[in-house]
Image (cartoon, rainbow, N blue to C red):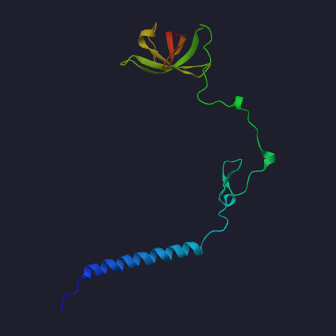
Amino acid sequence: MSKSKETSNKKEKEKKRLKQRQDKQQRMEERKAHKRDGNSLDGMMAYLDENGNLSDTPPDPRKKKVFLQEDMQIGVPKQEDLPPDEPRIGTVTFFNKAKGFGFINDTVTNDRVFFHIKDMEEPVEESDKVKFFVERSPRGLNALQVSKA
């Protein structure tokens, strides 16, 4: 009598493979049974209402707003040119004596302007009212000729 070539390990693998096949077939049948109606393009569409919320109903065409391409601004708007050389008035909001720089808030435009200790004509402290001239640099606005007002 010869030994069976089928081991218990092979039997277990075969049972596992058959079980996976049955599970897959069962899941496929469940999907077919619970298939959603309305899988057309209209059934899958979602719309945004005027408040930015998703809805199933299309927007009312009477409430449609028309935008002109020329009115749309893409990117960062260009900054306006600075007014002619007029002294500005502002308040020192930050000043670090050790590092030698600070910031001034312009009272008219509310711009935050950087200044360096070498651009000061007289010593200033935080919360001092100062007058200064402005120049534009690649990193932003710089104050020149900073003096107490």
Residue extending farthest front = 1
Q: Is residue 45 above or below residue 15?
A: above
Q: Quadrant of the C terminus?
A: top right
**How many numbered tags mark residues here?**
0
Q: Position of residue 114 (x, y in %)?
A: 48, 18
Q: Residue at x 22, y 86 (%)?
A: 4
Instruction: Tell me where residue 107 sits by quadrant.
Output: top right
Q: Quadrant of the N terminus?
A: bottom left
Residue extending farthest left = 1
Q: Is residue 22 above or below residue 131?
A: below
In the shown orientation, is residue 123 left or right of residue 66?
Answer: left
- Give whichever of 19, 7 is nearer the camera: 7
Q: Position of residue 55 (x, y in %)?
A: 68, 56
Q: Position of residue 42 (x, y in %)?
A: 69, 58
Instruction: Tell me where residue 122 sits by quadrant.
Output: top left
Q: Residue at x 58, y 27 (%)?
A: 76
Residue extending farthest right = 62
In the shown orientation, is residue 12 left or right of residue 142?
Answer: left
Q: Is residue 102 above or below residue 64?
A: above
Q: Residue at x 65, y 30 (%)?
A: 73
- Give whichever of 39, 52 is nearer the camera: 39
Q: Position of residue 146 (x, y in %)?
A: 50, 10
Instruction: Tell me where residue 65 sits by quadrant.
Output: top right
Q: Is residue 99 above or below residue 13?
A: above
In the shown orientation, is residue 123 left or right of residue 39?
Answer: left
In the shown orientation, is residue 19 left or right of residue 82?
Answer: left
